[in-house]
Image (cartoon, rainbow, N blue to C red):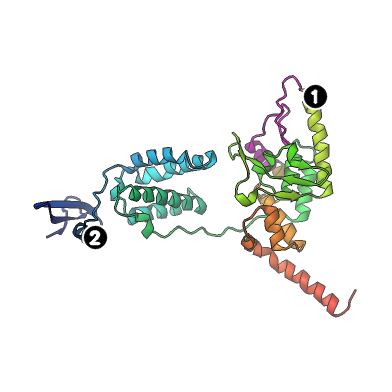
C-alpha cells in the first residue's frame, strides 16, 4: 500500500514508484500527521513526477538556511530592521522550527507556532505578524532556489492583530506634564512631541540646521535608530520626510533651548563634540532613547498623571488636531502618513466632536448667542 501508518512513529508515510531513463525508482516521504495529508502529498508528488516538474526536497535544516538568509538580508535592510529580524529569528522562530529540515515544514507546523505564541503571550500581536513576514520571506526564497517545491506559508492565514485601545492625554493632562517637566534637561523633547507630533527618533535626530526660526518650520531629514547607536538619513517612511510648521510659543522655547545649548558648548569647549544636534548631552553627544523613556516614566510617576508611553504623545497631538477641526489631509501631511486612512484609528474621539458640532449647529440654526 503506497500510504501506510508507521507503527514505530505513529505517523503516516508513503512510497511512490516511478520510471526515469528506463529505470524504476522509488521515493519515500515520512512523518505525516494524518492519512489524508499523506495521500495529498503523494498525489502531488506523482503529478509533479509525471509532468517532469518534481523538485527534490532539500534536507537542509531550517536553522542552517536561516543563517544564510539573515546574512543576505544585511545588504537590503536598515540596521534597526536587521536587529528586529535577528531577534525574532533567534529568540522565537528557530527554537520552534529550527530543528526541522526546510522541506519538512508544513502549514500545520507554522500554524501551531503562531498558536503557541498567541497563547503564551510572550509576543505582541504585531510581533507575531513580524514572525509571519520573516518565515514567509524565507520560504519564498527557498522555493525560488528550488530547495522546496512550494511555500507552505502561502496556505497559512496571516495572524491578526487585536486592536488595542489608544492611550492619550487631554490638553489639561498635557499641560500638567509640561509643568512638571519644565526644569528637566529633556523638557524640549517632551514639548516637541506634544506640539508637533514628532517621533522620538525624529526629535533626537533633529539638527539646528533643520530648524528655521524665521519661517517657524522644522525639517525631518534624519532620525536616530531605536537603539540609539546611529542616525539614518531621511525618515521612517518616504512620506515621513516632511516640513512641519511650528507655533510661535514652541519656537520661542526652541530659541531659549539653543541659548542654553550654546552655553554648555562654551563651558565644555575643550571636550565638546559639536554634532549640531538640538538634543544632546552636556558634551554634545547624542542622547540615548532609553534615557528619554526613563525620564518620561519617572516624571509621570512623580506627578501621578495617567500613565502612557512616550509614543502616545504623538497620538495625543493627533487628537488635539482633530478636536481643532483640522482636515484629514493636513493631519496626514503633518504626521508623515502616506494617506488619510490612519485617521480611522482615532475614531474613539469622534463622538465628542459630533456633540460639539451639534451644539454649534443648534446655536446657529436657532440664532442663539
Q: Quadrant of the C terminus?
A: bottom right
Residue at image point 72% right, 49% down = 243
> Toward which corner of the image does residue 319 lie, by quadrant?
bottom right
Q: Secondary structure at mark 2?
A: helix
Q: Position of residue 202 (x, y in %)?
A: 67, 43
Q: Is residue 90 visible?
A: no
Residue at image point 83% right, 33% down = 259
Q: Position of residue 299 (x, y in %)?
A: 72, 42
Q: Is residue 265 left or right of residue 161?
A: right
Tell me which secondary structure the magenta stretch mostly adopts.
loop
> Toward which corner of the image does residue 205 lie, by quadrant?
top right
Q: Residue furthest top?
A: 270
Compare residues 305 and 10 and report the one nearer the observer.
10
Q: Upstream in the sequence, badge 2 or badge 1?
A: 2
Compare residues 193 and 48 and report the one nearer the observer.
48
Q: Is residue 44 visible?
A: yes
> How many C-alpha atoms fall within 10 Å of the one at disc 2: few (<14), some, or many (≥20)?
few
Q: Secondary structure at mark 1?
A: helix
In the figure, 274 relative to 64: above or below?
above
Q: Position of residue 66 (x, y in %)?
A: 38, 41
Identify the mark at residue 266; answer none if there is no mark. Answer: 1
Q: Position of residue 109 (x, y in %)?
A: 34, 53
In the figure, 204 relative to 120: above or below?
above
| Tag 2 residue | 44
C-alpha distance separating marks 2 and 1:
75 Å
Magenta extent: 269-298
Asked whether the beta carbons under mark 2 and mark 1 sit within 8 Å of each other, the answer is no
Q: Residue furthest right?
A: 369
> How many C-alpha atoms fall within 10 Å of the one at disc 1: few (<14), some, or many (≥20)?
few
Amino acid at each position: 500500500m503506497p500510504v501506510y501508518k508507521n507503527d514505530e512513529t505513529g505517523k503516516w508515510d508513503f512510497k511512490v514508484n516511478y520510471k526515469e531513463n528506463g529505470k524504476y525508482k522509488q521515493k519515500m516521504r515520512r512523518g505525516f500527521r494524518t492519512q489524508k495529508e499523506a495521500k495529498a502529498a503523494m498525489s502531488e508528488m506523482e503529478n509533479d513526477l509525471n509532468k517532469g516538474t518534481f523538485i527534490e526536497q532539500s534536507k537542509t535544516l531550517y536553522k542552517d538556511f536561516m543563517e544564510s538568509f539573515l546574512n543576505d538580508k544585511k545588504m537590503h535592510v536598515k540596521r534597526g530592521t536587521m536587529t528586529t529580524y535577528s531577534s525574532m529569528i533567534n529568540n522565537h522562530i528557530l527554537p520552534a522550527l529550527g530543528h526541522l529540515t526546510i522541506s519538512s515544514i508544513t502549514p500545520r507546523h507554522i500554524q501551531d507556532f503562531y498558536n503557541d505564541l498567541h497563547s503564551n503571550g510572550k509576543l505582541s500581536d504585531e510581533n507575531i505578524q513580524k514572525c509571519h513576514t520573516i518565515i514567509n520571506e524565507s520560504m519564498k526564497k527557498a522555493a525560488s532556489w528550488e530547495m522546496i517545491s512550494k511555500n507552505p506559508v502561502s496556505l497559512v492565514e496571516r495572524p491578526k492583530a487585536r486592536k488595542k485601545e489608544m492611550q492619550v492625554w487631554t490638553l489639561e493632562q498635557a499641560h500638567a506634564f509640561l509643568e512638571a517637566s519644565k526644569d528637566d534637561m529633556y523638557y524640549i523633547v517632551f514639548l516637541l512631541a506634544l506640539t508637533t507630533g514628532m517621533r522620538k527618533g525624529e526629535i533626537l535626530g533633529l539638527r539646528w540646521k533643520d530648524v528655521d526660526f524665521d519661517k517657524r518650520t522644522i525639517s525631518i531629514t534624519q532620525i536616530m535608530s531605536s537603539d540609539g547607536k546611529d542616525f539614518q538619513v531621511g525618515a521612517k517612511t518616504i512620506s515621513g520626510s516632511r516640513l512641519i510648521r511650528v507655533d510661535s510659543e514652541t519656537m520661542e522655547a526652541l530659541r531659549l533651548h539653543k541659548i542654553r545649548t550654546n552655553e554648555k558648548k562654551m563651558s565644555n569647549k575643550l571636550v565638546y563634540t559639536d554634532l549640531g544636534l538640538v538634543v544632546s548631552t552636556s558634551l554634545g553627544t547624542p542622547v540615548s532613547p532609553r534615557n528619554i523613556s526613563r525620564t518620561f516614566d519617572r516624571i509621570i510617576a512623580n506627578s501621578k498623571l495617567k500613565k502612557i508611553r512616550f509614543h502616545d504623545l504623538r497620538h495625543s497631538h493627533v487628537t488635539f488636531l482633530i478636536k481643532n477641526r483640522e482636515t484629514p489631509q493636513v493631519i496626514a501631511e503633518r504626521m508623515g502618513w502616506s494617506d488619510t486612512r490612519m485617521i480611522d484609528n482615532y475614531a474613539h474621539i469622534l463622538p465628542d466632536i459630533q456633540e460639539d458640532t451639534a451644539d454649534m449647529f443648534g446655536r446657529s440654526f436657532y440664532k442663539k448667542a
